[in-house]
Image: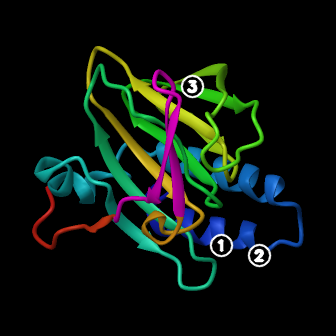
């Protein structure tokens, strides 16, 4: 047996329990997620869910630390809107496919009603086995590769449906505020 979801959860819980800065906790969590992504059979139990839809599929929700582990399939040659996840940090790991994670900086004061000044700061190309660490309020979006869909594991510090996020329209100079999407529990049924 390789490194499985329950091993990752145990290691992330241990990392989040350490009396260290959050950045160190997330680095330890990212190392654990890379171990999970290295197991070619790690997502075998969830192929039925991926066949039913893109997700996000809820794999685990932690009762003590509040983090959630989700699985998603993102269509090839697509970009998400520019956004941040509020106070929720994210560990975003690629199982299959490729994405460019675009990171942005905000150069205005962030006042309500003010035109947001959000500028591209860096592009991080991520492939299988790689993890992007997104701290709370990190403005970003992702563009999937043209060759095939991306399969990813997104670990969020909080359930996104319980917190306010921001979506930025850079062309229009607007920002929309609202709650994130709810992850769907993995459907019961046989696995391949």
Q: On the picture, is 56 further left or further right than 141?
A: left
Helix or strand or loop: what does disc 3 sit on? Answer: strand
Number of numbered discs:
3
Residue most toward the bottom? 63
Q: What is the C-alpha distance between the residues marked 2 and 3?
A: 30 Å
- In front: mark 2 or mark 3? 3
From the image, state whether disc 1 or disc 3 is nearer to you.
3
User: Does residue 38 show up?
Assistant: no
Element marked by disc 2: loop
Numbered mark located on residue 17 in the image:
2
Within-10-Å neighbours for mark 1: few <14, some 14–19, many 20+: some
Outermost residue on the right side: it is 20
Picture quadrant of residue 183: bottom left
Evaluate if marks 2 and 1 touch, with contact meaning CB atoms under 8 Å apart: yes
Residue 102 tag number: 3
Read off the magenta span. Answer: 164-182
Distance between mark 1 and mark 3 Cα atoms: 28 Å
| Residue at the image position 40 percent from the left and 42 percent from the top | 152
Q: Position of residue 53 (x, y in %)?
A: 16, 50
Number of the label disc, if any, that sits on residue 13: 1
Q: Residue at x 46, y 30 (%)?
A: 142
Q: Is residue 80 shown above or below 29?
A: above
């Amino acid at each position: 047996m390789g490194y499985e979801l329950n091993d990752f959860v145990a290691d992330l819980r241990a990392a989040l329990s350490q009396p260290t800065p959050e950045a160190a906790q997330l680095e330890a969590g990212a190392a654990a997620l890379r171990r999970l992504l290295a197991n070619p059979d790690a997502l075998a139990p969830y192929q039925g869910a991926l066949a039913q839809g893109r997700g996000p599929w809820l794999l685990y929700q932690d009762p003590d630390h509040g983090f959630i582990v989700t699985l998603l399939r993102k269509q090839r040659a697509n970009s998400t809107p520019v956004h941040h996840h509020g106070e929720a940090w994210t560990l975003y790991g690629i199982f299959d496919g490729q994405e460019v994670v675009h990171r942005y900086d905000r150069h205005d004061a962030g006042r309500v009603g003010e035109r947001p000044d959000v500028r591209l700061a860096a592009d991080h190309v991520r492939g299988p086995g790689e993890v992007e660490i997104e701290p709370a309020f990190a403005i970003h979006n992702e563009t999937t590769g043209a060759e095939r869909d991306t399969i990813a594991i997104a670990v969020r510090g909080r359930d996104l449906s319980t917190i306010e996020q921001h979506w930025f329209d850079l062309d229009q100079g607007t920002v929309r505020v609202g709650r994130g999407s709810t992850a769907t529990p993995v459907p019961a049924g046989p696995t391949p």
